[in-house]
Amino acid sequence: MQFRFQLVVILAILVAACSERAPETTVYDPAHDYFSFANTDQFATEHLALDLAVDFDKEQLRGSATHRMRRIDPGAGEIVLDSRDLHVTDARFLLADGDSVPADFRIGETDAIKGSSLIVTLPADLDPAGELRLRLHYATSPGSTALQWLPAKLTADGKHPLMFSQSQAIHARSWVPLQDTPALRITYEATVRTPPELLAVMSAVNDPLTERSGEYSFEMPQPIPSYLLAIAVGNIYFAPLGEQTGVYAEPELLEASVFEFADTQAMLEQAEALFGPYQWGRYDLLVLPPSFPYGGMENPRLSFITPSLLAGDRSLVAVVAHELAHSWSGNLVTNATWRDQWLNEGMTSYLEARLMEVIYDKDRADEERVLSYQELLLDLDEVPAEMQALAPRLDSGDPDDFQGTIHYSKGQLFLQYLENAYGRDVFDEFIASYFDAFAFQTITTERFLDYLEEKLLPLQPARVSRADVEQWLYQPGLPATVPVPRSATLDAAQSMAAAWADEAVDVADIPIDSWSPQATVHFINSLPADLSQERLAELDAHLGLSDTRNAEIGRAWFIQVATRRHESAYESLRQYLNRYGRGRLITPIYAALAQNGSDLDRARDYFEQARTAYHPITDASIARALGLDDS
Ligand SMILES: [Zn+2]
C-alpha cells in the first residue's frame, strides 16, 4: 500500500513538473496561509467526525474522517484538502437518505514542507444546494510527522506502548486529511479503538471516570483550529488536582505529577479572575514520556506536558501557567496564519508572567522575565534582520523553524510596554475586551492593530502612536523604549559569579541553597569565559551541577560544559542527552558541541546513541544543527 502511494506521489510530481503553468503572482498577502493547499474560500469544514483504530504493531491509525462542509462558492467543483503520507483508499459523499455517492480523488501538488494536496471531485449528480458530507477512508504512515509511536521499552513502565500526536504547526495533515490552516475553526467528534488495556485521551471532553474498554468516544463542542487536534493512547491513569483540574500520566509518574502540578486549580481560578471566564469546561494535564518535543502543547481541555518539569520542587511550573494562558490567547483567539504567531505566543508569554506574579510573587515572575529577555538578546544576534519583526513576511520555509524567542519574548515585551504606557488597570480591561471581542475567531496582526487603535491608543493619545506600534510589529530589533526587565535576586547571583571567579568568594560560600533555580541558571550563564578547567571542576563538585534533577539548571550547565570543552563532565552531559527529548533542553547542547571547534564528531556520536528515543521534530532540528541534512 505504501509502495503504491509512493508511485502515485512520484507520478504527481512528474505531472506537475511537465505541465505548463501560468507565471505565479509575487504579491505578498499577509492574510494568506502559505502553508496550506486547502481552498477554504470555496469549501469550509464545519464539523469533523473521526473513526479510528490505533494499531501499535503497524504504527498506524486506520479508519475514516467525515467532513461536514459548507459550500461557499457554488461554482466550485473540487475540494482541496491537506495531507501528508496518508493512504487514502476511498472518498464518498453521504446523502440524507443514508445512501452515498463515490467520488474521484487524486494527489495533486506535493511539497517537502507542506505535504500533498488531496483533491476530491464533486460528482455531477450531487445536489448543489444540499449539505456536503464527505467521508474519506484512510490510514496513516509509520513516518507520520505528527505521531510518535513509543515501543514499551521507551515508556516509564516498560510494558505498554504509547503514542501521542503533536499537530502544531502543520502536522495534523499527517494523521487526518483536512483543511490544515489556523484560519478555519471546526468542532469534532471521534471514536477511537485501542488495545483494551490502554486508555485514549483527546483534546476534547475527557471523562476522568472512563472505564478501560478499548473503545472511546469524544466530543469537542467548541470550534478549534486544526493544529489543536490531539490524541494520546497509552497505559495512562488520572488523578484529580482540583474540582475542574487533574492530571493523566503513566502510573510511575502520577504521584510526582500530582505533587509538581498541585497549584493548577489555583492557577485556573486566578486566570479567570484576570482574563475572563474559562470557556473549555475541564482543564487537565497529560504528562508524556521524555521524548515529547516541547515543554508543553496547549491542546484544549488537555495540555500535553513534558516530564522534564518534574523537578520535585515546583520550580518549573511556569510552563503550565503558559499552557493554561493559551486557553485564552491562542485557543480562544487564534493567529490567522503562522506569520501572526506572536499573537498566540507573545500574548501567552505576557499572561504567563502575570499569572506567575499572582500565584507566586513578583520576584519570581521578574526572574523569568529577565531570563527570557536574555535569551531574546542572544537570538537577536543570530536571527536575520528580516525575521526579527513580530509579524515578518512568512511565505516560505518550515513554520516549525519559525519558533523562537522573537514572537515569545519580543511579543511579551511589546505588551509589557503597552501595560506600562496605559497602566495595568486600563490594560487589563483592554485584554479582557479583546478576548471577548474575538472569542472563537482567528485574527491577523493587522486586525489586532486596528482594534488597538480603536480601543486603547485613543485613551491617552500622546503615550503610544500607531507608528510606535508598527515599529514593534514590522521592524527588526528592539525599540529604544523597550521595558528592560530587572531582578535584584538575579543581579545578586550575577555579582556572586564575578566575585567567585575573582577568588573574592570561596566556592563553599556560594549560597546556592537559598537561590531559586532561575538564580542558579543566571549564575551559570554569568560565569566569565576564561575560567580554567580546574575551577569549573571545583564548581561542579561543590554545587552538584552535573547531577542536578532540575532540567533547566542542567541545560544551562551543559551548554557551558560543551562550549568550554569541560571534558570531565562529558559523561554526565551524554546521560542528560539520553534523559530528555525536549528540543529546548538538548538542541542547544548539541549545537554548542558542534560549534566548539573539536567535538562535531562526538556530538554526532552522542546523537546516534540517543536519537531512537527522540521525536521526529526534535530529531530533525538536531540533525540540522549537526549538519546531517539527509536525515
Ligand atoms: Zn506557547
Image: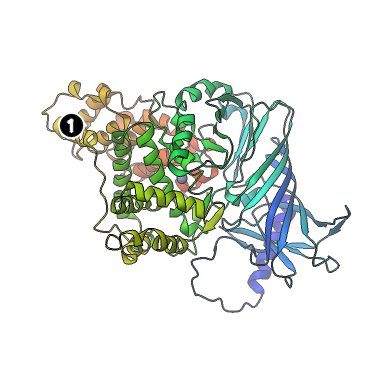
Tell me if residue 119 comes above or below residue 174 in the rendering: below
Return the residue nearer the eye: 291 or 236: 236
Task: Please give left or right for residue 343 compared with residue 24 in the image.
Answer: left
Question: Residue at left 52%, top 25%?
Answer: 241
Q: How is the image coloured?
A: rainbow
Note whether residue 295 is visible.
Answer: no
Tell me if residue 136 comes above or below residue 253 in the rendering: below
Task: Please give left or right for residue 583 compared with residue 281 in the image.
Answer: left
Q: Which residue is mark 1?
A: 496
Answer yes or no: disc 1 within 8 Å of ligand 1: no
Q: How many marks?
A: 1
The image position of residue 1, as x and y in percent, is 75, 50
The image position of residue 56, as x and y in percent, is 69, 35
Note whether residue 178 is visible.
Answer: yes
The image position of residue 209, as x and y in percent, is 66, 26
Return the residue nearer the eye: 56 or 7: 56
Instruction: Give the SS element for disc 1.
Output: helix
